[in-house]
Image (spheres, grey):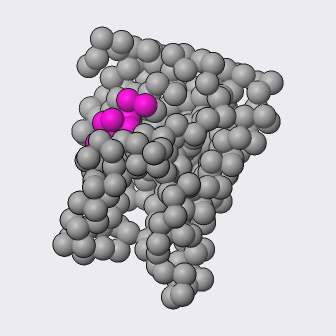
Amino acid sequence: MNSSANKLAGKIAVITGGNSGIGLATAKRFVEEGAHVVITGRRQKELAEAAAFIGKNVMTVESDVSNLNDLDHLYAVVKEKYGHIDILFANAGGGTIAPLATATESHFDKIFDVNVKGLFFTVQKALPLFKDGGSIILTSSNANVLGVPAFTAYAASKAAVRSFARGWTMELKDRKIRVNSMSPGPIETQALEKAGLTAEQAEQAAAQFASQVPLGRRGTPEEIASVVAFLASDESSYITGVDLAVDGGMAQV
């Protein structure tokens, strides 16, 4: 635990896609900072393992963000348990590789259903529970500004997320709710394997990414979690509408 522990003391936080990777690391960090956290994911087994890893002050709700009924259920559970939300980390998302020439409609729909539609309604349906002065953090990606071959549907979906942060900043400013997007670069998670690469291809891609990062390596989920905790806390009280890249400089220079 770091020296600024408890900067989220007593806060109620919802994290979608909180059962692995960046979401899980952030949930653990939030709890260390004093928050009570509700995490979602599509697989109950992974959620149970995540809750055990986090250890305390965590509740799990099996939920697919692309299913609006699941979102309604999520917020009904949160309302019954806590009555309100202070922080929302709309993090659930992902993507598979597919070149433009061969990408299918189902490839496109799957990415946009989760990364765009799912995120949109994750935020919309949270608003009635939100306390004024809260913080919403959206997971985008540095792909929102990079030209990444075979990853263009994913990149476009993350550019949409960046756009949401701008528009919602204006829509929610009267409620003093801050909205920011956070754009990771290559991070040490299972994302490459989930994108459809073999273990060997994922290793090669990771090495290639690392060579494109000025800091010379992939980031860790914990490094992302530190930034999300900052955006969630009052330490970032004068920051809204930004896209904070956490990418070792990859898309910055």
Any magenta on residue 50?
no
Q: Residue at x 55, y 20 (%)?
A: 236
Q: Residue at x 63, y 19 (%)?
A: 238
Name the image quarter holding the C terminus: top left
Coordinates of residue 82 in the picture (x, y in percent): 55, 27
Task: Name the side, left or right, on which 105 lies relative to 224.
Answer: right
- The answer to which image quadrant residue 203 occupies is bottom left
Image: 1 above or below 27 = above
Coordinates of residue 62 in the picture (x, y in percent): 45, 53
- The answer to which image quadrant residue 113 occupies is bottom right
Task: Name the side, left or right, on which 55 lies relative to 60.
Answer: left
Main SS, magenta residues: helix
**Span shown in magenta:** 220-227
Q: Residue at x 25, y 39 (%)?
A: 52
Task: Name the side, left or right, on which 228 lies relative to 121.
Answer: left
> Can residue 25 be seen?
no
Image: 136 above or below 31 = below
Any magenta on residue 226?
yes
Q: Residue at x 28, y 53 (%)?
A: 210
Residue positioned most to the bottom: 102
Image: 107 above or below 113 = below
> Can residue 173 be seen?
yes
Name the image quarter holding the N terminus: top left
